[in-house]
Amino acid sequence: MNKQLLFVKRPVGAADASTWSLETNPIPEITDGQMLIRQHYVSLDPAMRGWMNEGKSYIEPMELGSVMRAGSVGEVVAVKGVPGFKVGDFVAGGGGVQQYAVTDGKGWYPVDPSFAPLPTYIGTLGMTGMTAYFGILEVGKIKEGDVVLVSGAAGAVGSVVGQIAKIKGCTVIGIAGGADKCAYLTDELGFDHAIDYKNEDVRQRLKETCPKGLDVYFDNVGVPILDYALGRLRKHARIVICGAISQYNNKTAVKGPSNYLSLLVNRATMQGMVVFDWADRYQEAAQVMGGWMAAGKLKSRESVYEGIENFPETFNRLFSGDKMGKLVLKVLEA
């Protein structure tokens, strides 16, 4: 049987258990041109909250009654006429929150569990890593000597962004919530400074840690930290808008920056990024980051929880901050 989490109600504010329905259905039969994947892990990402909303976005909103959209990694257990795949292959793609997924193979790629644990392929070596890689290198355009600020720095994307910036010779400041997360940034990941937004005055700490200003700000959270960063820009600074997790569960209008004239004064740029724009270069990025991991320059951390029935509770850890690194749910049953 196949346990599936169906999206049944568009949430207003935070999603709760009523947003989804857990159903058990027979494992589907495949036809020619399809393969069946027994899924091991699914990815939990803040962007999933946006996919639940109606309206125009960078991707079509989910339809009510559909399997909850999610990245996933698992094993091919049956295949009929799908070139490049065979039974026993481990693959990553977008199988959704269910134990078995049927696909024609498009958008799926093989992974090697002997090189890295399977959750890494939906984290640092998956869309999370791709977002960090292209966001900081292609949109942020970092160069050696830059001063880089990262919000949500102990999270899945932010932790990789900061490490890439260090590899490229930048001074890196991370903002995270709590002493443990800040210690993780400096002691384990090599960030130069960490600011605890829950217990410190962020505006004052920015003055102390980047007295000459910022060259790049990688934004995962939105206001008010975005406003603080705007106040510290140097000439020709770049702001990468990757996410705004502080706004995703709003019941009122999204709040924008009030300090945006700093962009004019400093001839700075603020650009949004969506990882799908670099789909043709994912393999390139995975090879580079895999090399960094093999050399010990790039570390990956996943917070893994178990049980498809625990998806609602686990999903909301994204917004409570009760996790470290990449959030992953194991859906495979023993």
Image: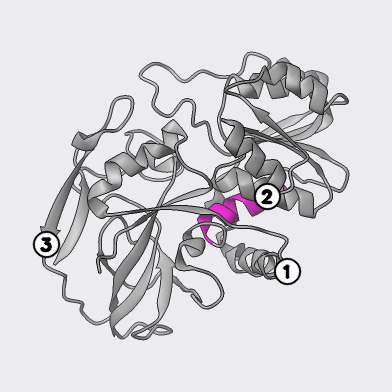
At 58% from the left edge and 50% from the top edge, which residue is drawn?
131
Q: Is residue 193 left or right of residue 51?
A: right
- Residue 143, percent across and down? 84, 47
- For disc 3, the marked residue is 25
Q: Main secondary structure of the magenta part?
A: helix
**SS of the residue under disc 3:** strand
Identify residue type, mark 3: Asn
Specify the farthest residue to the top: 258
Q: Is residue 181 magenta?
A: no
- For disc 1, the marked residue is 295
Find the magenta span and give its range. Answer: 126-136
At 61% from the left edge and 32% from the top edge, which residue is drawn?
179
At 58% from the left edge and 39% from the top edge, which residue is drawn?
242
Specify which label sits upstream in the sequence, 1 or 3: 3
Identify residue type, mark 1: Ala
Disc 2 residue crowd, few under 14, some 14–19, many 20+, Cα 10 Å: few
Disc 3 residue crowd, few under 14, some 14–19, many 20+, Cα 10 Å: few
